[in-house]
Image (cartoon, rainbow, N blue to C red):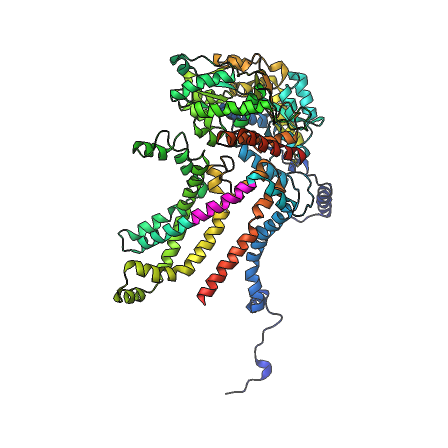
Amino acid sequence: MAAVRADEIPVPRGRPRPVARLRTWLDRESVLGPVLVTPAMLLLVLLVAYPFVMALYFSLSNAFIGRPSHFIGIRNFVHLWDSDAFRQTFQNAFVFTGIAVAFKVVLGIILALLLNEQLWFKRMIRGAVLLPWVIPTALSTLGWWWMFNSLYSVVNWTGLALGLMDPPGPNWLGQRYYAMAAVIIVNVWRGLPFFAITILAGLVAIPKEIYEAAHADGAGANARFWHITLPMLKPVLAVVVLFSTIFTFSDFNIVYVLTHGGPINSTHLFATLSRMLVIDVGRLGEGAAVSLYLFPLLVFVVWAQLRFVRKHAN
Amino acid sequence: MHPVSRRQFLTTATGLAGILASGVPPAWGQSREISYLCWNNFAPASDKKLSEIGQRFTKDTGIKLKIDHISHMGPQQAKYASEVQTQAGHDLVEMRMHFPWLYEPQLVDVSDVVGELEKKHGKAIGSAYEGAHVNGAWRAVPQYHGMFLATYREDLFKKASLKVPDTWEDLYTVGKELKKMGNPVGIPISQNYDSISTAGPVLWSFGGQEVDKDGKTVRINSAATVQTIEWYKKMFRDCMEPEVLSWSDASNNESIQQGKAGWIHNPVSAYIVAKQRKLVTADGINHHRSLGGPHGRHETDTPRHIGIWKFSKNIDASKEWIRYLLGKRETYDEYIMAGDAFNLPVYEKLQDHPVLRTDPKYAALRGEGVQYHTYGWPAPASDKVQLITNSYILPNMIAKAVTGTSTKDSIAWAETEMKKILAG
């Protein structure tokens, strides 16, 4: 074999093509990582960080729609306590969230246990259960509004027809306790699928062997639920309750469509009161303060629950 | 590709530099297009007519007009707020009552247009002046107005031999009978404008007021307010159903149209819609003169105006549209007639308008002996009056009282809230 001289070996001529150079550049982890993360970061900055910072700024100012504003410190947060609408809203938010989340947990577990059984049309039923969660909230709540409406209420019509109610039936949206019950019912109806499906995923993940061993040891259905199912569902439940608490506290659509916060502010939540103050009355600063009032508390809730989940996982 | 000569290059470059420096696009590039935001009129034929006139306007002037309708007051306010905050949106907006006061810094001075209209049609009526003439300048052009009056089921009254009420106390007397018949009185006591439109006249008729005519002193804590609340309490107990606490602006209309309510306080829209939709109740619905009290016969007048945002890039074209719609007598007449007496003209020379004679049931709109006012009367119009309105203090005060809070505490609450607004 004839020896090849070094100057005969073909070498690429000139500088490498731009595409090839780009490819080489992107092959470096220190470059590719930031490039991939940048679009998401941009979205977060534009859609989350910017509005949050603006809301923070508004809450510390006397901003009024269409007029110049001045920095006033935490005066909005302090003055809100003078407003009985705000105090009522504060109470409503805890009543609404507490009751709705409690119902969703209990009913969610029951529904998940039912869905975990061997049922006919299992897939269809599981799909149907998700419907309330899939339909746009404003649209489904309009349906509920019609059902609770004093003039057309099919709820009352049915109750009266079955002899369960005295005419004219409850005034669902016009009396404070009924109105609160109505918004909680719709919130539970809408949020239940999220609980049921997530808990179902947790149920499916529990090894069957544990149940079989417990059964062999003579544990009944109740004992199996309290000593196996519930403890093993705890991490899933913690996450679901965390998300639901945040979403329920900040609910807007249901209350806005059903009651507009009435009667006499008895169903206002932070989001709906904030909307009223900003949009109807024009007080941008006060409205922003209302919407941010629970932020520190919610951050604490998130921290505590995530800590619990992490501890449990370890 | 054609080669570009040096002369062509220089001409184009100089032109572009001029456009960029002046910030004004060339005539052929200027968007002769305007957009107009208005509400879904309670007389739907009026919206159709508006669109028809808009098309003619485009044909006659070459200015494209885009009309957007939005449902009633809540969404409209949200739209105003977002447009003002972002300094973008429609060129023209329809406004109600004292909204021009609230958005004064953002609205173009349209005194020139109003001056021309007043020369043709006479002075703008008092309510329009109160609503749109802000601190010495017109911030919106008076468009039309609508008055509240008593709307009742004449057929039911005749059947039960009930006397048509003349005072709020008379209404209590017939209201008791109506409720027994299953046709209660329908006066909303909730967070909406109709609630204020009724609470105001009742309060005024008993001699009360929210704020003094000095515009600074809160006068809600008075014997007249106590009388007003006591009247509402007995009406709520004996003549109405609790549903009124959850009503929207449309609910009283629907209640009488669907055959439930026997008497409501509303503009003629409930009847107009019943007539247009050929509802079985339409023939039985009629109107009567507004009710009186110990201190006279007072009624709510709701003027509407067209404003132009200062951020509009088409202010001249926008003014042209207003002149086209309201300036020509025949076009304005056409527009008013389509509103079927829900939209009434706001200029003095047009007050005895033929639309009032299109249906004998509109006779009560003549309002003999009735004093018409905008919200907050006798306080002078201001942004504060609109804020008291938008905070729904009057209906919330009454709602508190009829649901168990003492009259004294309800009034004290309203007084505190009003003082806060006037102080702020």
- B162 displayed left or right of B87: left
Residue B45: where, in percent of width, then height?
49, 23
Query: Quarter of the image holding residue B132?
Result: top right
- A275 displayed left or right of A204: right
Residue A226: where, in percent of width, then height?
34, 59
Where is A146 relative to A79, above or below?
A: above
Identified at 65% across, 19% down, the residue is B124
Residue A51: where, in percent of width, then height?
59, 49
| Image quadrant in which the C terminus of chain A is located | bottom left
Residue B91 visible in the current orientation: no
In magenta stretch: residue A104? no
Query: Quarter of the image holding residue B87?
Result: top right
Identified at 32% across, 55% down, the residue is A113
Residue A17: where, in percent of width, then height?
59, 67
Q: Which residues are magenta?
A: A86-101
Where is A170 relative to A304, above or below?
A: above
Residue B238 visible in the current orientation: yes
Query: Quarter of the image holding residue B323?
Result: top right
Pick the residue in front: A144 or A232. Answer: A232
In magenta stretch: residue A91? yes
Q: Main secondary structure of the magenta part?
A: helix
